[in-house]
Image: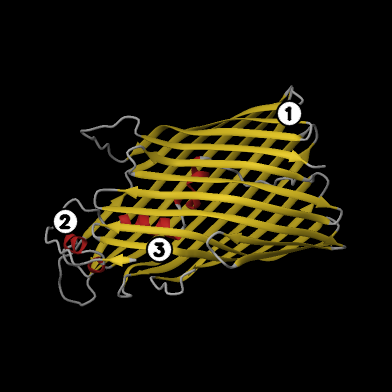
Amino acid sequence: MTINLDNINTIKGEGLPSPFIFLVISLGFVNISWAQLGSQNWLHPDPIFITIEDSSSYINIYNDTHIGLINFNDSLNISENKQGFKLVNRTSNGLIKFVYNKHHSIVQMIEKDYSITNSNNYNEMLLGFKIKKRLITSDVSVTKYSGINALSPSLLLSTNLHSNMIFSFGRSNKKIPLQFNLNYTDFNYSLNKIYTDHVIDQYRVSLRGENYRIEYVMDDDNWKINSSDSSLSKIDLEDGNIKTISLSGYLSLSNNQKINWSYTTMNSYSKLKLLNNSNECFLELNKYTNDNYIYSLSYLFYKSDYKFNIIVQKKLVDLYTSIRIWPSRINNDLKSFFNLVPRIINNSTGELKQNLISIQIMSTKFVFLSPYIQIDWIKDRYDITIDTRSLSIFGFPIPDYSDNQKLNMIGKEAINLLVGINMIKNKWSFGTSFSQHIPYKIDVIEIIVSEKKEKEDIYGGGEFNFSIIRYLD
């Protein structure tokens, strides 16, 4: 990490960004990337329903790509890609699995006076064993992440408390590499040899019958930031936790009808400090919370030669951040821009709501071929307030800085169009799909007219999935 404050600029600093840009920095940093913040599931909602595991031995090759937003002048890039393969070999007492994944995600913002890059580029290899002996089933795996010498083990134990009830509990470790870079005029802050270290405790209760299943799952993820470089002391994570609770199930009715439902909450909390070369804090995320609530309901039925799946989903996200910024510890331009105040306080709140109605139609009249189409009608509402003000810690009068803003974009209505095809022939299975997010109405508080309008310079909301399976049975 390099920090240079020798270039003193006495210009007032007009046109430099207001400090709410550091809200963006902190949100992206704490959530590792905007893709993990939920942009993919916000643009392409995916209900969390119970899926039936494949009981065969197979080899699976896949590629999943999501482009949240791309600006073709290279000023903004938000995207995520995952590709790899999976081998599952089932035995009489369990299974053996090997998984290789290659991850790439990036959040990059490049402007005249500042730039932010937050990226994840890593490979992971997993070797796992699942063994069942009498009433106990043990699922053990070890994962190796690129750039990290340590291994990440996990263990999940399951037992049948009753003929129709399964109770599971376990613990897993994940060490995910992370790169972060912030540039502001002559200020450069880089973290390259760090990773997020997760310890996840999982509890699961499953009640199963011939025509129904109810499942309760709780994941408690305590995480911190570590480094492969023992000399790193430029970040201080005080606390980080993500707790996810899900209650889901299905009910199979007569005449090939099925009802799926799920209710999920995800609560995130964290605090951290970014330190300069003098070990002084220049940005403190005093408190960050992100609370998600998702309810999904679907009705699946067959009619003639088609399978229909109708889905209704509601989502609510509550955000809160409390940030402290020391401009003098970042750059003299920034210090003069905020009237030489010693500290800036940013408190931001946000509420995001989403309603979704979806219908999927799949053709079943072909034996080996199943084309399908899905249309999602999405309505979003946003209420975000960003409050920034100066604070004197010395008690004497200084010029005040105050900036209270509400997000200009307060709502959006969009259509998701998804087309796909599944083919099964002999011991081969092939599937591919493409989804496009298409906004058709955007609600704003006020219309901002630009003198110079660029056309077709932004692409956003595309998702592509590809999978090939070779069954070994």
Identified at 18% across, 67% down, the residue is 6
For label 3, the residue is 191
Q: Is any part of residue 106 visible from this angle?
A: yes
Q: Is residue 83 above or below residue 423?
A: below
Structural crowding at the residue carrying mark 1, measured as other residues with C-alpha within 10 Å and reported as few (<14), some (14–19) or many (≥20): some
Q: Is residue 410 above or below residue 345?
A: above
Are the residues tagged 1 and 2 within 8 Å (C-beta)? no
**Labels 3 and 1: the sequence-earlier one:** 3
Q: Is residue 396 above or below residue 296?
A: below
Q: Quadrant of residue 130?
A: bottom right
Give the left or right position of residue 65, taking residue 206 as reference. left
Q: Is any part of residue 200 visible from this angle?
A: no
Structural crowding at the residue carrying mark 3, measured as other residues with C-alpha within 10 Å and reported as few (<14), some (14–19) or many (≥20): some
Are the residues tagged 3 and 1 within 8 Å (C-beta)? no
**Residue 54: x, y in percent?**
76, 45
**Residue 403: x, y in percent?**
24, 56
Q: Rounded to the nearest whole Å, what is the CA distance between mark 1 and mark 2?
A: 65 Å
- The kind of residue on which mark 2 rests is Gly
For label 1, the residue is 302
**Labels 3 and 2: the sequence-earlier one:** 2
Comparing 168 with 411, the one in front is 168
- The kind of residue on which mark 3 rests is Leu
Q: Is residue 434 above or below residue 295?
A: above
- The kind of residue on which mark 1 rests is Tyr
In this picture the colour scheme is secondary structure
Comparing 197 with 362, the one in front is 197
**Labels 1 and 2: the sequence-earlier one:** 2
Label of residue 13 in the image:
2
Q: Give SS at disc 1.
A: strand
Identified at 26% across, 32% down, the residue is 453
Q: Give SS at disc 3.
A: strand
Identified at 51% across, 64% down, the residue is 196
